[in-house]
Amino acid sequence: MGGKQAKPKDDRIPRVYWDACIIISLIKNEQRLDPTETDAVRELKHKLDDGKIIGVTSAITLTEVLDSEIPDGRRSELKKLQQMPDRFQFSAVDTKVAEKAHNIRDSYRKMPDKDEKTVSTPDAIHLATAIIQVCDVFYTFDEKDRDEKKTLGLLPLSGDVAIDNLEIRKPPPAQQRLLDATWGRSAGETQGEGDA
């Protein structure tokens, strides 16, 4: 699934899920180790501002973003997202989301190749929200399993049946989008099956 393009099922504006780490990166104006990731987050925000995507995240993101870790001049960025409900949606955690998150965690826990690891509760809520909100793609930087916590990274789960074949990947670099537009391809068509 990772090699397929992230596009809406019809002519509607793509619904793009932002994991909490994407929002934290945006709000903190984080300079990531890979500079293309920093550019990708900025490009994602430009697409949101231009109305080319609808951003979606779970309301638990509000819990994950700690004011104490946000630089003084950047605290308004989260409020800006909250003030654009037509373009960015904070989806409530209800019984339907909680049950879906439970099923995701339980499915991974039962998989013999996962060594009894599962998805963390916040990550399961994010995944369940993306599925229920019919998002076209789930963007995150969460790629590594955390052995000490027995939890799975998210990027390797892309396309799994346990998450309804949801496509999970890093936001594509802005330069890649420019090249794709030049060659008439979507960003997803240029990535191989193992690419994030």
Image (cartoon, helix red, strand yellow):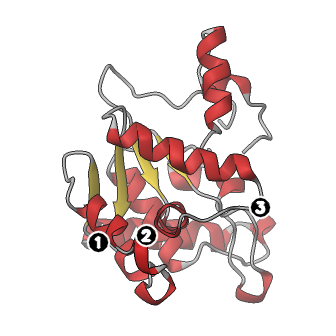
- For the residue carrying disc 1, how many other residues have a C-alpha within 10 Å: few (<14), some (14-19), or many (20+)? some
Q: Which mark is residue 125?
A: 2
- Dots 1 and 2: beta carbons under 8 Å? yes
The kind of secondary structure element at disc 2 is helix
Indicate the position of residue 81 as horizontal and vertical percent values: 30, 59
Given residues 36 and 192, the one toward you in this image is 36
Given residues 161 and 179, the one toward you in this image is 179
Can residue 78 be seen here? The reply is yes
Indicate the position of residue 46 as horizontal and vertical percent values: 43, 41
148 horizontally vs 60: left or right: right
Residue identified by numbered label 3: 33
The kind of secondary structure element at disc 3 is loop
Residue sitting at x 41%, y 54%: 130
- For the residue carrying disc 3, how many other residues have a C-alpha within 10 Å: few (<14), some (14-19), or many (20+)? few
Indicate the position of residue 50 as horizontal and vertical percent values: 33, 34
**Badge 1 or badge 2: first in the primary sequence:** 1
C-alpha distance separating marks 1 and 3: 32 Å
**Badge 1 or badge 3: first in the primary sequence:** 3
C-alpha distance separating marks 3 and 2: 27 Å
The kind of secondary structure element at disc 1 is loop
Can residue 4 be seen here? The reply is no
* Amino acid bearing label 2: Ile
Residue identified by numbered label 1: 93
Quadrant housing the N terminus: top right
C-alpha distance separating marks 1 and 2: 8 Å
